[in-house]
Amino acid sequence: MKRQFPPDLEQKMTEDEKNLTEFERLFSNEWLSKDLGTPVHKLWNDPSSIASLEMYLVDQCMRSIREISDGWIKSTRRSIVNCPDSRHIAGALAEIIFAGAFSEGGNDVELGSQSSPV
């Protein structure tokens, strides 16, 4: 499936980024290919520019956060995969985006406790 990115952005993206490899690596192609109807699955199966940009943003933020805490990312993934509630998934994705965005530029980010809810 060919994702739609704005041409100016796509020219600057690596193949790794165009393929959203961090996103796919985290969730696994096996899980993403299931028809579960979660927000993550809907994004993954939607090649539109809006969905592609949303996934690109999450992908880039996951790359930033992985440098801070790979364990936090994996725990967040488990909470997304194990909870079909759309609001929970949206909250977890928002945490990834906010943490990744704030960590850009070398800012210190303290990630939430694994035991606290999203």
Image: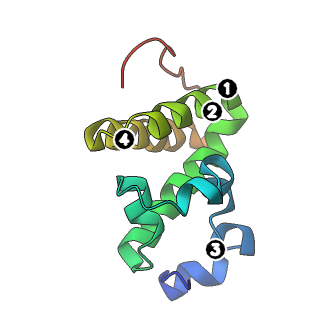
> Contact, CB < 8 Å: mark 2 with mark 1?
yes
Asked if residue 103 is positioned above or below residue 46 in the image, the reply reads above
Which amino acid type corresponds to the residue marked 3 in the rendered image? Lys
Asked if residue 83 is positioned above or below residue 8 in the image, the reply reads above
Displayed quadrant of residue 36 = bottom left
The residue beneath circle 2 is 74
Q: Which mark is residue 18?
A: 3
| Label 4, label 2: how far apart the Cα atoms are | 14 Å
> Contact, CB < 8 Å: mark 3 with mark 2?
no
The residue beneath circle 1 is 71
The residue at 64%/47% (across/down) is 26
Displayed quadrant of residue 19 = bottom right
Which amino acid type corresponds to the residue marked 4 in the rendered image? Ile
The residue beneath circle 4 is 89
Mark 3 or 2: in front is 2
Of the 4 image quadrants, the one containing the C terminus is top left
Task: Mark 3 or mark 2: name the one nearer the start of the chain.
Answer: 3
Task: Mark 1 or mark 4: name the one nearer the start of the chain.
Answer: 1
Q: Which mark is residue 33?
A: none
Give the SS element for disc 2. helix
